[in-house]
Image (cartoon, rainbow, N blue to C red):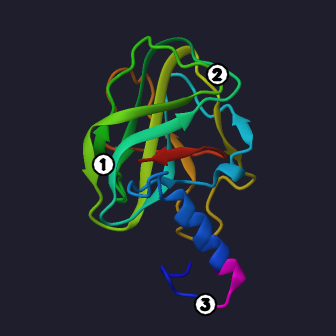
Amino acid sequence: MTQLGRYTGNVRDELSYASDHYRQASAGGSTATRSNMRRLDAVADTGALTTQVMTSVALYLRKGDVVTNLTFRSGATAAGTPTNYWFALYSSASTPALLAQTADQLTAAWAATTNKTLALSSPVTITEDGVYWAAVMVKATTPPSLVGVSTTASAGIISGEKPLAQTSGSSLTTTAPATIASPTTVATVPLVVAT
């Protein structure tokens, strides 16, 4: 990717930069916005969630970013009789540690095709560039489907490459685990936006 204001002559690099720059600016241009994929790539209505199991997606963040909210978008299936749900942000460590969690939404509705933006318990200032983990957990009779993409290669292709999405935990309710332990790589990758 090119640096701000530097033209390399490579059209592909310039388009990549323009797309990345667009995603990182709010309408007013002052709030950093990060996402794990372009909205144009989020073409699937994924069944990414299993009740009481956390799904976490890789999210590249840069030093100095301040993450206050996480947004996931439901697909065609609404949350059916939810009893707990929350979002969380985890570190880029080899065993990712919990940085912040949103309030448990309990029985609040999450309708179909709806952006759900939840505030973290406190803003998180990112201290180093890296791949962090944005997580969602829903305990419900029917968890909502999430907008994203279904990949054909769930595991990394290059040795040591991090997965795009993973599941972990079981029987989760009100509180995010302190770490992401024993994750299982999955092929469904929900779209997440951090602001």
Whole-number angstrom distance, CA of label 2 to CA of label 1: 31 Å
Q: Secondary structure at mark 1?
A: loop
Percent from the top left, x then y, of residue 74?
Answer: 61, 29
What residue is at 58 percent from the left and 30 percent from the top? 49
From this viewpoint, which residue is outermost toward the front?
28
Residue 121 - label: none
Q: Is residue 114 above or below residue 31?
A: above
Percent from the top left, x then y, of residue 54?
Answer: 47, 34
Closest to the observer, 67 or 141: 67
- Decide: few, some or many residues near mark 2? Use Cα within 10 Å; few <14, some 14-19, many ≥20: some
What residue is at 45 percent from the left and 33 percent from the top? 117
The residue indicated by pointer 1 is: 97
Whole-number angstrom distance, CA of label 3 to CA of label 1: 38 Å
Residue 36 image-quadrant placement? bottom right
The residue indicated by pointer 2 is: 112
Q: Quadrant of the N terminus?
A: bottom right
Closest to the observer, 91 or 79: 79
Amino acid at circle 3: Thr
Foreground disc of the pair 3, 2: 3
The residue indicated by pointer 3 is: 8
What residue is at 60 percent from the left and 23 percent from the top? 144
Magenta-highlighted residues: 8-13
